[in-house]
Amino acid sequence: MTSKKLDYAQPSLEGIIRIPGDKSVSHRSIMFGAIAEGTTTVEGFLQSDDCLSTIDCFQKLGVEISIEGDKVKIISKGITHWKEPDEILYTGNSGTTTRLMLGILAGSSVSSVLIGDESIQKRPMRRVTDPLKQMNAKLIGRETGQFTPIAVEGTKLQAIHYTMPVASAQVKSAILLAALNANGETVVEEIETSRDHTEKMLEHFGANIAVDNKTIRLLGGQKLNGTAVVVPGDISSAAFFLVAGAIVPSSKLTLTNVGLNPTRTGIMDVLQAMGASFTVNDAANSSHEEMGTIEIESSPLVGTEIGGELIPRLIDEIPIIALLATQANGKTVIKNAEELKVKETNRIDAVVNELKKLGANITATDDGMIIEGPTTLHGGDLLTYGDHRIGMMAAVASLITTEPVTIDNAGCIAVSYPTFFEDISSVIK
Ligand SMILES: O=C(O)C1=C[C@@H](OP(=O)(O)O)[C@@H](O)[C@H](O)C1
Ligand SMILES: C=C(OP(=O)(O)O)C(=O)O
């Protein structure tokens, strides 16, 4: 663990950042390429620790994957040709890898064991293993499938009609990926619309999938064909610079290559509601997802209410939105965000504890937090809890603090944004 002292001496920010590839889409590009028959090429792939964990799992399953910078090539004969791995599949810090792999492996023809790092070993898996077991999956894990390590014996699956108890793209995706290898038509009903990258990519790889508002239908037995994927930039990574641009005085940033899938753009709604000054130009396109350029500059902000259907559209952005709210005039209330408790760490407690150390007026609630602003933030020694998004939130905070901020573990940021500190340095004036 490498601690890092962040001593930016209250700069202003100016310049252009090309946002690195979307983590969710990068994971899925490898998974779909491995399931599909033929060659898949990926451009704009995010070479982060989490996405490399996904590649490593599929290489252990015998899928041919080569990486050259942000370009990846996957050659596969399809899921029925995978080899049984002779090693444990290690999913690192990645919830997406762990949960989606469970869905994929359940309907494969191999037996395997999945394990992740210390944080993953505490994250709930029954939300995935329960519905998969209803599909006839053979899974064994600690506390009846709640925690990794989990052993999976691939088998023939049955379609399911599943009403999701939580808004989770990982749960939805695990079921849909299992459904590809199940007998009959699977129906998934969401309680709130979560990110739809899996649905979009299924179509892009040639599957027939019907989406009617919050109901998704997918017939099993469909073959996927290898194809070309262009990954948009990750709006969850852009979020740190959107907030930096909005709160660091006299700043103006241009963020290019930003994924603008409407199931992910909740932070733009929040910036709008808070009175931030920005423009969006959505002219560019990836292979199958919206993307564009966002320009943002600092301006006075007001507090807002964030809850309901907005939450899944900005779930990973809540730590940085909390920092944004410390600089807004008045009260910001974040509610219906209990899912934050089961991320890399309990993000309600982590955000509240660490922002309090800098002098923020912030209180934890059962399902979110309440922030009163604006407050001048001072320096301090902050913990990341090994959570990349807490680390990046602390780093952006350090751009406006009156003294330096030290973070205990800068390395954890590499799970989603390995070039984060270079990108900060490139826009400091
Ligand atoms: O499907 C995905 O790629 C993701 C879904 C979300 O998790 P949940 O499905 O647990 O909400 C999100 O927090 C995570 O960073 C990535
Ligand atoms: C929650 C996250 O990812 P995962 O669930 O894939 O670990 C995240 O990136 O904020």
Image (cartoon, grey):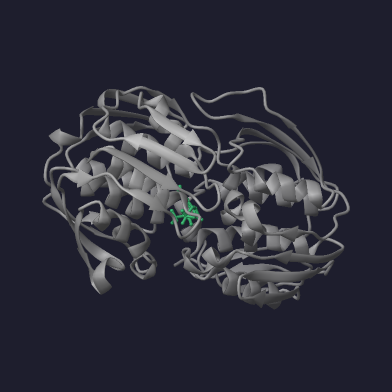
Residue 25 in the figure: left or right of residue 138? right
Number of marks in the rendered image: 0
Task: Find residue 386 and report its horizontal and vertical position in percent.
Answer: 47, 66
**Quarter assignment of residue 324:** bottom right
Query: In this rendering, does residue 325 appear at all?
Result: yes
The residue located at (60%, 42%) in the rendering is 235
When asked about the image quadrant of residue 14, the answer is: top right
The image quarter containing residue 205 is top left
Q: Is residue 136 left or right of residue 100?
A: left
Where the C terminus falls, by quadrant? top right
- Any part of residue 397 in sight: no
Q: Say if 162 sits above or below 283 in the image.
A: below
In the rendered image, residue 348, in percent from the top left (x then y), is placed at 59, 70
Locate the N terminus by quadrant.
bottom left
In the figure, 196 relative to 121: above or below? Answer: above
Q: Residue 395, image x and y in percent?
A: 64, 60
Residue 238: x percent and y percent?
63, 44
- Depth order, front residue of 152/372: 152
**Is residue 289 found left or right of 369 in the rendered image?**
left
Q: Is residue 229 above or below residue 164?
A: above
Q: Nearer the viewer, residue 388 or 30?
A: 30
Instruction: Determine the residue positioned at 31% across, 55% down.
Output: 91
Query: Left or right: where does residue 71 sit relative to residue 79?
Result: right
Q: Going 39% across and 37% down the picture, which residue do you hit?
A: 217
Judge by depth and name the residue closer to the eye, 104 or 423.
104
